[in-house]
Amino acid sequence: MNETALEFNAIEELVSVVVPVFFGMIAVTGLFGNSLVILVVIANPQMRSTTNLLIVNLAVADLLFVIFCIPFTATDYVLSQWPFGDTWCKCVQYLIVLFAHASIYTLVLMSLDRYLAVVHPIRSRSIRTEKYTRMAITILWVVICTAFSPIAFMHGLDYCDSTEDTLCCRFLYTTYPMATFHITFMATSFIVPLVLISGLYIRMIIRLWTTVVGNKLSTESQKGRKRVTRLVVVVVVAFASLWFPIQVILVLKSVDMYSMDSTFKVLLQIFSQTLAYTSACINPLLYAFLSENFRKAFRKAIPCFTKYHGYRSGCQDLPRRSSAGINCTTSI
């Protein structure tokens, strides 16, 4: 066996052990964090604002992404073939694309909500309500579910290699050009949303820095708006920076400009994919650090954690008690 073969065998063995463990950590963190965000808002009626409803929707999308993507990606790393059948192969690929778009377009809605609150605070009161927010979320899911339904038919079981003895869940080249698929995916899930979000935030930042504040009440209002805006901006920047590397790699692979012919390229793609999946569990951490309302709610929800960190006032309100596939199954 030559040196190259030995090198790839070694890296394959390392990946099959380390990646599932690391993905498991991401999955546990994502399940716990996103579930906590959802429960905190549901359990606190005073937190049911338009912004927090969108945050809950983002947590739902991230939670579903964790459930339907990470376990099957780990399976691809460990096993040499797809064991779940052709139907589930198609379903998983569709759900991955669906939940990824639901997450990023929820960020777009959050940016629009902040834009309206800051730039048009009076005129937007009639539409920035729970009723219209729920309608917007419903329309978002219906449109995404419908628009990306063809994804299921672009994937299926195919032979993993020339030996034709194992079947893998992969993109079917005969149904649609792979380059067109990945370029379209990058445009719809990355470029277009970031352009929209950037435009909204530029207008909002201009308004925040040019508005003349005349009294104490408006000063407090401006501070509140800036805090919420900072939260959403950080979430967007985190999402963009975490997803950008894998987006570029998948597009380059689809046009035969990135081949898995070296250990460095294999590890680079694994690292990029790990970053992308981390986006599904990082949002709750950002809320805990940047939102005072969520910090208070988290402290009440996790008394042991808060007591450890010295937040005793939050605990006082509670009763005392004892306490070989590198891609995500080939697409993203």
Image (tube, grey):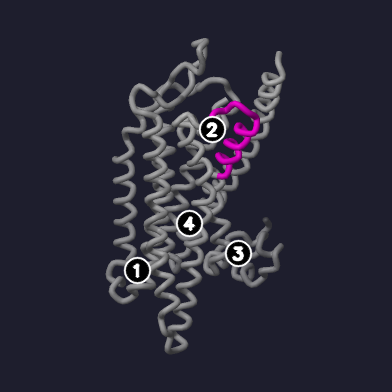
Residue 265's image quarter?
A: top right
Q: Amino acid at mark 4?
A: Val
Q: Amino acid at mark 3?
A: Arg
The magenta-colored residue range is: 258-275
Q: Are the residues flagged by discs 3 and 2 in contact, CB closer than 8 Å? A: no
Residue 225's image quarter?
A: bottom left
Q: Are the residues flagged by discs 3 and 4 in contact, CB closer than 8 Å? A: no
In the rendered structure, which disc, 3 or 2, sits on the residue that comes first in sequence? 2
Which residue does the numbered mark 4 point to in the structure image? Answer: 236
Which residue does the numbered mark 2 point to in the structure image? Answer: 73
**What numbered label is drawn on residue 116?**
1
Residue 177's image quarter?
A: top left
Which residue does the numbered mark 3 point to in the structure image? Answer: 299
Q: Is residue 218 left or right of residue 286?
A: left
Dominant SS type (magenta): helix
Spatial distance from mark 4 to mark 2, Cα to Cα? 24 Å
Q: Amino acid at mark 1?
A: Leu
Whole-percent x, y for residue 214 in the image: 42, 89
**Residue extending furthest toward the bottom:** 215
- Asked which secondary structure carries label 2, the reply is helix
